Image (cartoon, rainbow, N blue to C red):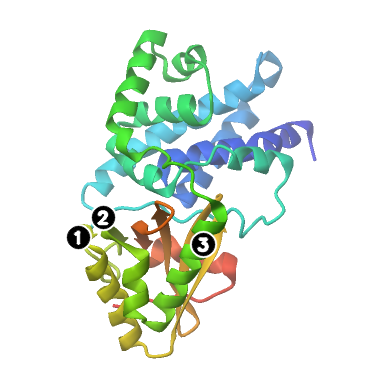
Amino acid sequence: MSDATFTFNHHRPRLQSIAYRMLGSWAEAEDVVQDAWLKWHAADRGALANVEAWLVSVTTRLSIDRLRAAKARREHYVGAWLPEPGLADLADPAPSPEQALERSHDVSYALLAVLERLSPEARAAFLLRDVFDEGYDEIARVLDRTEAACRQLVHRARVRLKDERKPAPVNPEAQRSLLQAFAQAASTGDFTALKSVLAADAQLVGDGGGKVASFGVPLLGGQRIAQLYLATCLRFRGRVRCEIALADGQWRLLRFIEGKLESAQYLETDGTRITRIHAQRNPDKLARLAQTLGRELSVQP
């Protein structure tokens, strides 16, 4: 392996993290990192004062350009748009030190979803500052703006996202026990148990991408959500299985129908009840996860 390839691969986890958090898509993130590699390969590397800063800058700019194009497509997306599920913890149960460092920067799936509200430049400024701890001088260099302008971008992003920041810490064991109870109830269609673990004002956001059935607006109310899970169990009697798994340091529920992956659902709790569910059902966005799990996809209408 050449020195150039070794150096790039050393920084690759950080570059992939930036690109994925900018785009919410692993396929697009990989394309961005590949483009960054081509620019790295063609660069005068001996003239670079700070290799990591240069690579972060190139990756961020490429992500901004790609996100501008993606936003036009997402405006016509059928139903709610949610990011692809994370693969860490499943694909790499024993991460390298570099991968472990990048996972420490993880944001919640809910926050990743609402980052869609921001302009590409504001999203980049917010992520670089609040997630990757970059200084405003570096953000200004990356975005080709003044430090004052970047501070304003970050401030406005924080205001828009203030209700979607990381929730208050929840006891990990209590959370796991709650999610396991939900997984069991969702597997068996135990309506009483489902209602007991869902907050009365819980909400469910689903992404079917126009490929499978989903709600165009969030489904509100614990009872209505419990009825939805019950209906699935009644339709596929004895053929529904749910299990919880870690992804990017966050618990999620994987639902299998007849042994095939049907959805990946990110669950938020207040420590005693489940308050929100983001259900990714779009088969295009589940394909990589299914491949990682070694499972087929279940495409249910």
Look at the numbered discs 3 and 1 and tell me whether their residues touch, using CB distance below 8 Å: no
Above-or-below relation of 73 to 284? above
x then y, percent, for residue 46: 71, 17
Please give the label number shown on residue 80.
Answer: 2
The residue lying at 44 percent from left, 53 percent from top is: 271
Q: Earlier in the sequence, mark 3 or mark 1?
A: 1
Q: How far is mark 3 from mark 2, CA to CA?
A: 20 Å
Is 159 left or right of 239, judged from the image as shown? left
| Foreground residue among 200 and 55 | 200
x then y, percent, for residue 219: 22, 62
Q: Residue type at mark 1: give it.
A: Gly
Q: How far is mark 3 from mark 1, CA to CA?
A: 24 Å
The residue lying at 40 percent from left, 63 percent from top is: 284
Q: Nearest to the eye among marks 3 and 2: give it.
A: 2
Identify the residue under disc 3: 288
- How many numbered marks are there? 3
Around disc 1, counting alpha carbons within 10 Å, would you say few (fewer than 14), some (14 to 19), or many (20 or more)? some
Q: Residue type at mark 3: give it.
A: Arg
Q: Secondary structure at mark 2?
A: loop
Q: Residue type at mark 2: give it.
A: Ala
Around disc 3, counting alpha carbons within 10 Å, would you say few (fewer than 14), some (14 to 19), or many (20 or more)? some
x then y, percent, for residue 255: 44, 73
Look at the numbered discs 1 and 2 and tell me whether their residues touch, using CB distance below 8 Å: yes
Identify the residue under disc 1: 216
Q: Quadrant of residue 198?
A: bottom left
Q: How far is mark 1 from mark 2, CA to CA?
A: 6 Å
The residue lying at 43 percent from left, 79 percent from top is: 187
Is 296 left or right of 97, judged from the image as shown? left
